[in-house]
Image: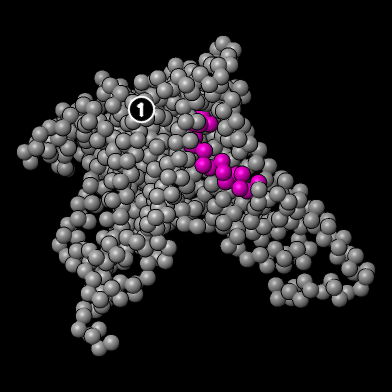
């Protein structure tokens, strides 16, 4: 035991030689620069006038303004893209929060025969990659006469296995005594849900909503397949097609569009980082 | 709540009449619960049935047909599967995808693990949380936006990356116009956007390793590298398994980045399996064939996952 004092204290040991001092700081600094660099460059370039996006040195701060932002509104119907994206993302998020809340509550709190089996089956559907189901879903949508509408993007996205799983986990963390107390006080099961559990579920619902927002705001594959006419494009699709028009597309103008499309995601990141992080990694640790 | 707790045990001690009423209310209560369960589960169960279960079954059936939506479907047996073997584009796409998964996943895990270890060591709490946010940040962007940004940064004529490379005396890299360049670019862009996810998993895993293990090792005089090799890495192996399984599953489905960056080119050098599914279905209107490829991809994902669990059994350590 006496030997302990001859060794460095654990605090400084944890900061072991390999990872200590300048090399570590340098490594982290490079990593931060490489992670944020492209985004900083994007914002700076978008702030340059359309004609001289690439002329000036990449980090100079002269001549910055919002001309490219104005130009992107002239070149594409950006308001329509924004409206479409907001509609699709908003309705997907609200729909998922709604169905996941109801389903998660039942799977966590109301026993019935076959509940375990039904839940496992729903969970199993998460393992099937979207590429397998996309063709039949496309045909279903076509059969419903919804092809090339925003509903084609919204409707299939609302029932959510993952959201149901998240909400079930969440409801299971709430004390079961609340339900018993409510039942003894004569509350109906509906009343118990509505007045006791649903109000307590807000943080769980926030996770579902934020995850849904982040996913559908950025989604590319499904909109590419389900929408045909430009009036139904969402932002990512509109930006890619704007970039494709190489003839007219100034780098600064395209990047101005990209920056605009990032703003809501950025707001969610700032205000919903913790729930987003927790939601993403839920299910990876059992 | 405190007042209601005793009444829970009371039915057994009350009179026969009271007992009957309790059972009666219990059964109406039960009925109401069942009704609630039915109504509440309907949207999810019906929705998942219609938009996931039916399509899965549909995909399996469709794989045995030749169908272009316009004319009526024709049963072709296993033709859609057997013809896949001779499809050169698909073979190339599979080879590309596998090579991509191997390189991208290894790089992603290595970067994520290194950064997680560096961030987790002695740093002020505020700095650690800032760094965590920074490395998590690319995950919130759309793959389409990221790919657009990178296609400019890596442009051979005016891109900043090549300007820097030539500035320090390195040769110009034809990122978008040569096969190997484009393949490397897709890997870099994908890893740039996704390492944060593995990073989050590793940070969580590292936090669960008890500090005193390191203290004991330090007392025994173990160096930093030895501590990493003999403590951190083994104790982190369950996390590494999860991180690698998830990374492989998602990398096998890559589409957005190569589609936006290169449309699969130059030649077929960045064409992926999902891209071939997309082209078969929505450009060539070969829906049966596209379904068959989708099924093959799913089987492939399942095999890759099973293989990783298999391999991991040999070296995984649960503390």
Task: Quarter of the image for the C terminus of chain B: give it.
Answer: bottom left
- Can residue A141 be seen from the camera position used here? no
Q: Where's residue A135, x and y in %?
A: 52, 26
- Can residue B232 be seen from the camera position used here? yes
Q: Is residue A135 left or right of residue B196?
A: right
Q: Residue at x 36, y 20 (%)?
A: B88
Task: Quarter of the image for the N terminus of chain B: give it.
Answer: bottom right
Q: Is residue B268 magenta?
A: no
Element at label 1: helix
As rendered, which of A114 and A186 lies closer to the eye? A114
Q: Is residue A48 left or right of residue B256?
A: left
Q: Main secondary structure of the magenta part?
A: helix
Q: Which residues are magenta?
A: A118-134
To which chain does the residue with label 1 belong? B
The residue wearing badge 1 is: B93
Please determine whether, in this image, residue B10 is positioned above or below residue B64: below
Q: Residue at x 24, y 52 (%)?
A: A32
Q: Residue at the far bottom: name it.
A: A2
Q: Quadrant of residue B219?
A: bottom left
As rendered, which of B10 and A128 lies closer to the eye? A128
Q: Is residue A129 magenta?
A: yes
Numbered label tally: 1
Q: Residue at x 29, y 41 (%)?
A: B103
Q: Where's residue B236, x and y in %?
A: 36, 60
Q: Where's residue A233, x and y in %?
A: 44, 27
Please determine whether, in this image, residue A151 is positioned above or below residue A266: above
């Amino acid at each position: 035991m006496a030997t302990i004092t001859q060794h460095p204290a654990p605090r400084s040991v944890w900061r072991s030689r390999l990872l200590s001092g300048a090399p570590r700081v340098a490594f982290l600094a490079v990593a931060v620069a490489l992670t944020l660099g492209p985004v900083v460059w994007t914002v700076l370039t978008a702030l340059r006038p359309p004609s001289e996006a690439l002329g000036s040195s990449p980090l100079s701060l002269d001549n910055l303004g919002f001309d490219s932002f104005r130009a992107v509104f002239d070149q594409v119907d950006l308001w329509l893209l924004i409206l479409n994206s907001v509609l699709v993302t908003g309705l997907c998020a609200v729909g998922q929060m709604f169905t996941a809340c109801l389903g998660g509550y039942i799977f966590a709190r109301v026993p019935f025969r076959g509940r375990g089996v039904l839940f496992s089956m729903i969970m199993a559907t998460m393992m099937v990659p979207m590429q397998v189901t996309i063709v039949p879903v496309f045909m279903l949508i076509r059969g419903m006469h919804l092809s090339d509408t925003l509903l084609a993007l919204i409707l299939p996205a609302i029932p959510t296995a993952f959201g149901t799983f998240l909400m079930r986990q969440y409801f299971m963390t709430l004390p079961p005594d609340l339900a018993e107390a409510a039942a003894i006080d004569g509350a109906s099961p509906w009343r118990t849900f509505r007045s006791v559990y649903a109000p307590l579920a807000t943080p769980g619902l926030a996770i579902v909503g934020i995850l849904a927002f982040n996913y559908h705001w950025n989604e590319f594959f499904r909109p590419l397949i389900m929408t045909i006419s430009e009036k139904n494009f969402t932002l990512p699709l509109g930006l890619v097609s704007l970039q494709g028009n190489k003839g007219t597309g100034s780098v600064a103008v395209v990047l101005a569009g990209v920056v605009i499309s990032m703003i809501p995601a950025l707001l969610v990141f700032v205000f919903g980082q913790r729930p987003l992080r927790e939601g993403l990694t839920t299910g990876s640790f059992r | 709540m405190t007042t209601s707790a005793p009444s829970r045990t009371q039915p057994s001690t009350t009179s026969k009449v009271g007992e009957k009423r309790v059972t009666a209310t219990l059964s109406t209560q039960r009925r109401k619960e069942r009704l609630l369960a039915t109504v509440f589960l309907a949207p999810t169960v019906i929705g998942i049935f219609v938009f996931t279960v039916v399509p899965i079954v549909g995909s399996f059936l469709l794989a045995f047909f030749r169908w272009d939506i316009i004319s009526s479907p024709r049963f072709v047996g296993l033709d859609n599967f057997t013809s896949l073997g001779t499809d050169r584009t698909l073979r190339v796409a599979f080879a590309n995808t596998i090579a991509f998964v191997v390189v991208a996943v290894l790089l992603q895990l290595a970067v994520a693990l290194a950064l997680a270890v560096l961030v987790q060591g002695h740093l002020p709490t505020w700095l650690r949380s800032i760094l965590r946010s920074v490395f998590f940040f690319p995950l919130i962007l759309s793959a389409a936006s990221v790919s657009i940004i990178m296609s400019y940064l890596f442009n051979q004529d005016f891109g900043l990356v090549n300007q820097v490379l030539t500035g320090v005396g390195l040769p110009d890299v034809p990122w978008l116009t040569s096969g190997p360049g484009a393949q490397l670019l897709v890997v870099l862009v994908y890893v740039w956007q996704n390492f944060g996810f593995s990073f989050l998993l590793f940070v969580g895993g590292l936090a669960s390793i008890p500090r005193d293990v390191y203290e004991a090792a330090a007392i025994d005089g173990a160096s930093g590298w030895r501590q990493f090799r003999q403590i951190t890495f083994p104790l982190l192996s369950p996390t590494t398994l999860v991180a690698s399984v998830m990374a492989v599953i998602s990398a096998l489905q890559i589409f957005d980045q190569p589609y936006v960056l290169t449309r699969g080119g130059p030649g077929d050098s960045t064409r992926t399996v999902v891209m071939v599914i997309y082209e078969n279905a929505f450009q060539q209107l070969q829906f049966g064939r596209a379904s068959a490829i989708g099924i093959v991809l799913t089987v492939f994902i399942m095999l890759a996952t099973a293989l990783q669990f298999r391999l991991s059994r040999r070296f995984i350590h649960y503390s």
